[in-house]
Amino acid sequence: MSVEPQLETDMIPAVVLMTLLWSTDLQAQSVSPPAELSVRLVNGTTSCSGTVEVFNEGEWSGLCTSWWSMMIEVRFVCRELNCGNPVAESGGPLLEDGRRRVILGGCYGNESSIRQCDIVRGGPGGCNGRTYHHVTCSESVRLVGGSGLCSGRVEVKSNQSWASVCEADFDRQDAEVVCGELGCGVPAALQGGLYGGGEGQTWDKEFQCKGKESLLLDCDTSDRENNTCLPGNAVGLTCSEPDDVRLVGGGSRCAGGVEWYDQGEWRIVGADDWNQDNLAAVVCRQLGCGSTVSVLPGNITRGNGASCSGSEPSLRDCYRMYDLLPGLTVICSDLLVQPDIFLTDPMGGVSRGHQEPEVFRGYSFTITCSTQPQYPGGSFLLTFTGSNRTQTQPAVNHSAAFLFPAADDSHQGNYSCVYDNYVFSHNFSSESELLSLTITASPLPAFIIRHVVVLLILLTAITTSYLYYKPTRRQKRVNRVSSMDLYVNAMEMVSLSSRAEAGPGEERSAQGTE
């Protein structure tokens, strides 16, 4: 038996192992460590989501902060990782794992790296009550150059680089998908060059979304018919703010305690006394409720604190503090819903064949004002455009009717209803849309047709009555004749019977008597 083949066989695994160790050592030497204060996201579902960590003094450290912007401040994380817009963020206790901490003092939203923020490098241990942060950024679409997180020039990521989208390749259904992907509301404005003409690459496909897709890159695309996109035609998009703020308990969507939808549930929002007016201004703006009228102390329940400058488009653009602060009640100027106005005509003197209703001269008409049942009481003021003539009536069952006995040319014009009510120690009002009214002469054909119709109805009624009662009367006459015949026949039978029972003498006597 030869020993040499066995030795060669035993040496092969050793050689392979040495080769693998040498290759691994070379790879380790060739891979340089991350740059100091680099950022990464770990334990997320995508490369653009996860818990924020910072490379600090040779190791990855947790990021600590005592307060964190609801969205704006985390933009640097998304930018540094070449992701899109921040879509969501959440916080929680930081585990005590002995690693060093990087404490974030504050960012303003325009930084491209954490190095441009205010930071403090801490030692090992916890965050002293501060929190870690889980951030979710969009992966393949972003809005650039807008005033907030829901407006800007549309850019799509392709091969790790961002490209503008031509206006001709993008429509409202595409915009609905983008707004939804970025956690915003519905599209509000869509226009080429709205937020700059765009620089660098241009997306070379035309999107064909159906509006229900969750991601823009899930939509179908097709080759652009025209391979050129004119300068300045990069599409700009403005989405409405997300529906994640509400006012509760005030009888109106524009009054009540402030709540914010966070991590699957509605949470009370609190603020320090010095910042309540700024926060209220942001809430009223986001809800489309006008301006702030008053800020009232909330209930004893405390909520997650927020701090705003007052100019933010939505509450998630403000700073969030994880300290519990007293809740607050906000009253906005657009407290009352818009009332309705409509026209009625008990005499049939209104023609609705035109865009604007027409009332025939001399006919009566009624203008009715009504509103939704928000608060009891109040009054309606009926105004007439171009005249100082007004009428006021109290709101009864949330409505009021204004009767005009006879229409004339002075009644032609535009009318509106103004609903006034005194609630929350303030006067509030809301105005309806305009009702345009035209006074016109009664058309003769219409007058004749109306009377002919009345006559036909009367004639039909008379004919029906005649046809019904005629056989009835005939039947009654027949019945009466039949009764007489029966009576005569009966009398004759009685007479014959009497004669049969009497003798001949009696019969002759009876005849003589007759």
Image (cartoon, rainbow, N blue to C red):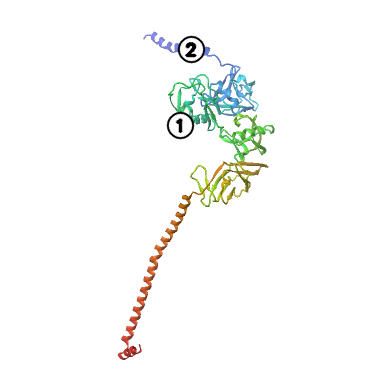
When asked about the image quadrant of residue 256, the answer is top right
Decide which of 100, 454 is in the foreground and name it: 454
When asked about the image quadrant of residue 302, the answer is top right
Evaluate whether residue 376 shows in this view: no
Looking at the rendered image, the quarter that the C terminus falls into is bottom left
Residue 70 picture location, percent across and down: 60, 29
Decide which of 475, 443 is in the foreground and name it: 443
When asked about the image quadrant of residue 40, the answer is top right
For the point 66% across and 42% down, the residue is: 427
At label 1, counting other C-alpha atoms closer than 10 Å, the crowd grade (few under 14, some 14-19, many 20 or more) is few
Is residue 151 shown above or below 400? above
Q: CA distance from mark 1 to mark 2?
A: 51 Å
Nearer to us of marks 1 and 2 is 1
Element at badge 1? Answer: loop
Residue 92 picture location, percent across and down: 60, 29
Number of numbered discs overlaid on the protein picture: 2
Q: Which residue is mark 2?
A: 23
Element at badge 2? Answer: helix
Q: Amino acid at mark 1?
A: Lys
Q: Amino acid at mark 2?
A: Ser
Looking at the rendered image, the quarter that the N terminus falls into is top left
Decide which of 426, 88 is in the foreground and name it: 426
What mark, if any, has residue 210 been given in the picture?
1
